[in-house]
């Protein structure tokens, strides 16, 4: 049997989440669902309720209060009534209650709902604490450890129900908007719980490395962690790579760029949705709310990836992991050596030069790679002053490569190296010793992180 | 439909308030004090203006009757300027309600006003407003005893020093 759906003149989408009661009354009045006489009764009863609450607020000791206080109490009363009306099955039921119950009664029902909601908030807070991610991010830690303490200690449902006495700094993928009071806190904690739940499928140390790759000082940032983890997981899924490492090499980023740049934004979102569903299956995610939460974040994530593609900054979107304890290795390619015959000819010409300026001119003209330069420095058996002038032509990284390849070890040099090589090592060593201390330290630092190819 | 804070129909409220004020005449007549209907209306309007000026809102009958009945037996008031005197008292009351940050109850504030007015101020509204109540409000804001008077303390100290000499 088909269920009969009630029709209502009220447009539910126009109702505010934060000011539900006021917006419902306004909609009902505008659409003629609530008569002017009824709406006047509601207003007068609201004022009577305000007078009663104000008397309770001042404990009968003052007949007047400052307007801001009265406004706060009024907002709290309307919020409390709204929270009860929201708990009803539909707008029709809410309007029926407005018409047939006194405002004071609705307020009392609202207080009961508020008390139940505080318990729900407490439940979600416990879940958040249990699934808390091990991270150095301060906003995340402080928000969970200390941010909700004022709420659970001081939330006051009688006169300040619409307020949020908490210090929430950490930003969620889906920011909570259009809610106030305990409803805001519940929604925030619920969202944070889903984010924690998703992050719990990955190793906390790996997440830390991902976030360090995102920004080395991410512990001081207010950025969301789960979003970056989800982005990296999606990237791994798109590459059909293992999900748990959450890492990308340069080749991976190139492959992603080639794979995704052909799509329009709408097509990209479809591809990401498919990838997200595969990701959910592969990670064996079972919580339906978590699945919905992740899928709902796709439009935002699509925009981020699309922007990364158009600005050629995909490495800022799919972030390679960065372990601050491991220094990055730089691969240095020495280059291809020139043809042997050409090399012999060049060396003969070089050695036959009478003036050193001519030798320098040959180097500048014909030497194109560090491999050739290295051979020439050894073959030419230069004096220290001449070698220094050639070393002056080199970049720091080139000097670092030479230092790494030709360290001066007087004890073994005589056996393992030829006289020309030892001469070159001595020249290089003398040149390096003459460099300013800062530059020398920089070059020696480079030698530890360079891998010569 | 607006949910801005407002009083009920002003006319009805004022009419009710005026009749309540006039009822006080039955008691104040024993002290040869009475308000005409016009003066009672003016007093109610003064209350509304003061509330508006000092950013306050009042529910219920308000404090006019309490002020009238508390000050009925003061020796410094006569029928001549009675209405003007009450208007000033009402305005002073709401001003100091704000100045004391609502930390003092209606009854205590009216009682304090009466005590100073009949006592050290000897019937001077200016001394009440600009000296005694200002000092009292400052004491309340600082968390001191409302009656604390550092001037009085220093005078006593000076007298003690004179006695020693």
Image (spheres, rainbow, N blue to C red):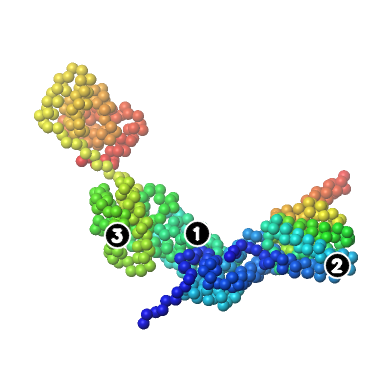
* Marks 3 and 2, how far apart at CA: 85 Å
Q: Nearer the viewer, residue A33 or A239?
A: A33
- Counting other residues with Cα less than 10 Å from the Cα at mark 3, is it few (<14), some (14-19), or many (20 or more)? some
Query: What SS does tag 1 mark?
Result: helix
Disc 1 with disc 3 on a shared chain: yes
**x, y (%) of residue A435?**
32, 29
Q: Which residue is mark 1?
A: A147
Q: CA distance from mark 1 to mark 3?
A: 38 Å
Q: Is residue B68 left or right of residue A113?
A: right
Q: Which residue is mark 2?
A: B28
Same subunit, tags 3 and 2: no
Q: Name which quarter of the figure residue A399 lies in.
A: top left
Q: Chain of mark 1?
A: A
| Residue annotated with mark 3 | A270
Q: Secondary structure at mark 3?
A: helix
Tell me the quarter of the picture where residue A433 sits: top left
Q: Residue at x 88, y 59 (%)?
A: B80
Callout 2 secondary element: helix
Distance between mark 2 and mark 1 Cα atoms: 58 Å
Which residue is pictured at 73% across the width and 56% down the height?
A: B95
């Amino acid at each position: 049997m088909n269920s009969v759906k009630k029709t209502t003149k009220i447009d539910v989408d126009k109702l505010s989440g934060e000011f539900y009661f006021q917006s419902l009354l306004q909609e009902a009045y505008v659409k003629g669902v609530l008569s002017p006489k009824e709406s006047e009764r509601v207003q007068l009863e609201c004022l009577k309720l305000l007078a009663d609450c104000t008397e309770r607020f001042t404990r009968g000791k003052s007949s007047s209060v400052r307007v801001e206080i009265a406004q706060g109490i009024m907002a709290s009363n309307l919020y409390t009534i709204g929270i009860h009306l929201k708990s009803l099955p539909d707008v029709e039921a809410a309007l029926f209650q407005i018409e047939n119950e006194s405002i004071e009664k609705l307020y009392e029902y609202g207080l009961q709902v508020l008390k139940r909601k505080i318990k729900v908030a407490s439940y979600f807070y416990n879940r958040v604490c249990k699934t808390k991610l091990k991270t150095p991010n301060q906003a995340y830690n402080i928000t969970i450890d200390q941010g909700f303490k004022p709420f659970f200690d001081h939330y006051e449902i009688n006169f300040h129900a619409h307020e949020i006495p908490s210090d929430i700094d950490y930003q969620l993928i889906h920011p909570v908007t259009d809610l106030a009071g305990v409803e805001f806190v519940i929604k925030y904690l619920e969202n944070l719980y889903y984010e924690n739940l998703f992050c719990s499928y990955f190793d906390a140390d790996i997440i830390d490395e991902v976030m360090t790759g995102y920004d080395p000082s991410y512990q001081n940032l207010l950025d969301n962690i789960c979003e970056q983890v989800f982005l990296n997981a999606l990237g791994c899924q798109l590459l059909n790579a293992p999900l748990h490492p959450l890492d990308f090499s340069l080749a991976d980023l190139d492959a992603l760029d080639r794979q995704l740049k052909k799509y329009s934004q709408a097509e990209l979102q479809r591809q990401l949705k498919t990838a997200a569903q595969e990701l959910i299956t592969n990670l064996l995610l079972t919580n339906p709310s978590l699945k919905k939460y992740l899928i709902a974040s796709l439009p935002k994530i699509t925009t981020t990836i699309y922007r990364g593609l158009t600005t050629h900054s995909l490495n800022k979107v799919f972030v390679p992991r960065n372990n601050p304890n491991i220094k990055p290795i730089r691969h240095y390619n020495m280059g291809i050596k020139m043809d042997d015959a050409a090399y012999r000819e060049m060396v003969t010409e070089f050695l036959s030069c009478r003036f050193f300026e001519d030798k320098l001119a040959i180097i500048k003209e014909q030497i194109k790679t560090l491999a050739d330069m290295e051979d020439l420095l050894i073959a030419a058996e230069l004096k220290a002053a001449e070698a220094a002038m050639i070393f002056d032509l080199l970049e720091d990284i080139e000097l670092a490569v030479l230092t790494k390849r030709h360290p001066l070890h007087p004890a073994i040099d005589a056996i393992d190296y030829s006289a020309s090589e030892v001469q070159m090592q001595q020249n290089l060593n003398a040149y390096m010793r003459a460099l300013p201390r800062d530059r020398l330290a920089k070059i020696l630092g480079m030698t530890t992180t360079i891998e010569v190819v | 439909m607006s949910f801005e804070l407002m009083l009920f129909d002003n006319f009805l409220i004022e009419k009710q308030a005026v009749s309540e004020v006039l009822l006080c005449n039955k008691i104040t007549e024993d002290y040869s004090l009475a308000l005409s209907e016009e003066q009672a209306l003016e007093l109610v309007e003064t209350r509304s203006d003061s509330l508006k000026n000092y950013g306050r809102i009042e529910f219920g009958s308000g404090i006019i009757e309490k002020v009238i009945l508390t000050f009925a037996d003061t020796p410094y008031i006569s029928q001549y300027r009675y209405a003007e005197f009450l208007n000033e008292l009402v305005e002073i009351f709401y001003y100091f309600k704000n100045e004391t940050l609502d930390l003092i109850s209606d009854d205590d504030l009216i009682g304090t006003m009466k005590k100073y007015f009949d006592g050290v101020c000897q019937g001077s509204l200016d001394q009440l407003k600009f000296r005694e109540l200002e000092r009292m409000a400052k004491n309340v804001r600082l968390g001191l005893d409302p009656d604390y008077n550092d001037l009085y303390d220093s005078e006593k100290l000076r007298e003690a020093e004179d006695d020693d000499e």
